Image (tube, coloured by chain):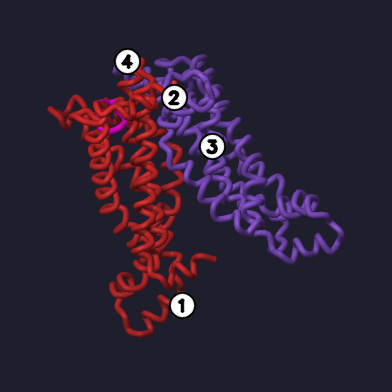
Chain colours: A red, B purple
Amino acid sequence: MIVSVWEWLVDPASWSGPGGILAQSLAHLRYSFIALLVAALVAVPVGLWVGHTGRGRWLAVNIAGAFRAIPSLGVLFVAVLLLLPRLRGELAFELPALIVLVLLAVPPILSGTYAGVQATDPAARDAARGMGMTGAQVLRQVEVPGAMPLIMSGLRAAMLQIIGTATIAAVVGMGGLGRFLIDGQASRDYAQMAGGALVVAALALAVDQALALVQRALVSPGLSTASAR
Amino acid sequence: MIDSVGWGTLGELALRHLYLAGVPLVVGLLISLPLGWLARHVRWLGPPLVAGTGLMYTIPSLALFILLPLVLGTRILDDANVLVAMTIYTVALLTRTVADGFASVPSHVSQAATAMGYGELRRVVAVDLPLAVPVVAAGLRVAAVSNVSIVSIAALVGVSQLGSLFTDGFNRNAMGPIVVGVGACVALALLLDAAIALLARAVTPWLRRGVPA
């Protein structure tokens, strides 16, 4: 069995062409980063606002926990059944799945951003105010850099959720690496299923490590020594 | 709406779901306790152990369900794949939590126990572990809720549980079973979450007597 999986993985025919591993990896990455970007554009400002003003704190604290209980596969099917009759063309399959990817990515980013602002050293915040900084300056120059480690871990958690859910979205017709897992199963081709599963696991690991590097670059060196404990 | 599924079927699927999510939770905790203790007490082992188990969590669940038969020699429909996958995810979440839990035990308490003549093993089991319960229980609740949600994905490889209602409803273009399935999944997750919270409360009576921490 392992031999046939290996043979599928090293066969150049599996890699090339419009339905090949290369093309599907790029599609998977494209969906994932679009979803992450849209989710971050919503969740980071809201998280910063909640953290800065302290309003809506209850929501920001509990939203990630509550969403964790919701099964992504069920939500995916609900979205497709609801939206499919109302959409046309190529978007009909992609849009419901993309909406679900964004929805599932918002809670971890939102609560990470909020928790990051909350975790900012109050002494640093007071000092900034004492120096005469306005609210916006405190937010931009103190709270955002201070929140960066937790914002980034929120983004990484969201990205893992997105990549996993994008994989299962193949069952509702979306492209990406999930195609090999779902199509392989439909044609009882275990080599293709397991080969695709290996590639998607590698992709998830690589993206997470890449984001870890971004995190290292973005987090102020003064913070990373303090938070290393 | 429940009629679209039937109480009998719903109960059966819910029990299967509880089994597939719950057993790995217990096994995963039993594996994480020594791992977390090692990560905390063997200095050079800590970072690689926490990072290594954490990496397992990055593997998408559908991929893991499909890959495990290669490693275990099982068939793709076997429950064992789901049980092992969920145990891996539980260990991935809990090893760090257990290490944090042991770190939360005040060192003067451990030292007092040692001074009273407690041996290393007895101290860990009778003093450190009970004091680590609040932190470990919080992690266990996260793992329980996420397990229940992840198990439903196993419906895609044909392992029956509440997630089967999703695939069944989708194939018949029927919203009823999907909505019932989502509701039942969330209810099961909240139930497990509450059960762990109550259990943790029951085994930490000192936290309720207003004793200063």
What element does badge 3 sit on? Answer: helix
Q: Is residue A131 above or below residue B44?
A: below
Q: Evaluate whether label 3 is on the same chain as label 1.
A: no
- Residue type at mark 1? Ala
Which residue shows up at 35% across the image and 52% down it? Answer: A210
Q: Residue furthest left?
A: A89
Residue B159, percent from left and from top = 47, 20
Subunit under mark 3: B
Subunit under mark 2: A
Nearest to N terminus: mark 4 or mark 1: 1
Q: Residues within 10 Å of mark 3 (few under 14, many from 20)?
A: many
On whether residue A174 falls in the magenta region, the answer is yes
Subunit under mark 4: A
State how far apart marks 1 and 2 are (Cα): 58 Å
The mark found on residue A187 in the picture is: 4
Q: Residues within 10 Å of mark 2 (few under 14, many from 20)?
A: few
Whether tag 4 and tag 3 are in contact, CB under 8 A, the answer is: no
Q: Evaluate whether label 4 is on the same chain as label 1.
A: yes
- Residue type at mark 4? Ser
Q: Residue furthest right?
A: B117
State how far apart marks 4 and 1 are (Cα): 62 Å
State how far apart marks 3 and 2 are (Cα): 21 Å
Q: Evaluate whether label 3 is on the same chain as label 2.
A: no
Which region is colored magenta? A172-179
Which residue shows up at 54% across the image and 66% down it? Answer: A229
Mark 3 lies on residue: B88
The mark found on residue A123 in the picture is: 1
- Between A50 and B66, the one nearer to me in the picture: B66
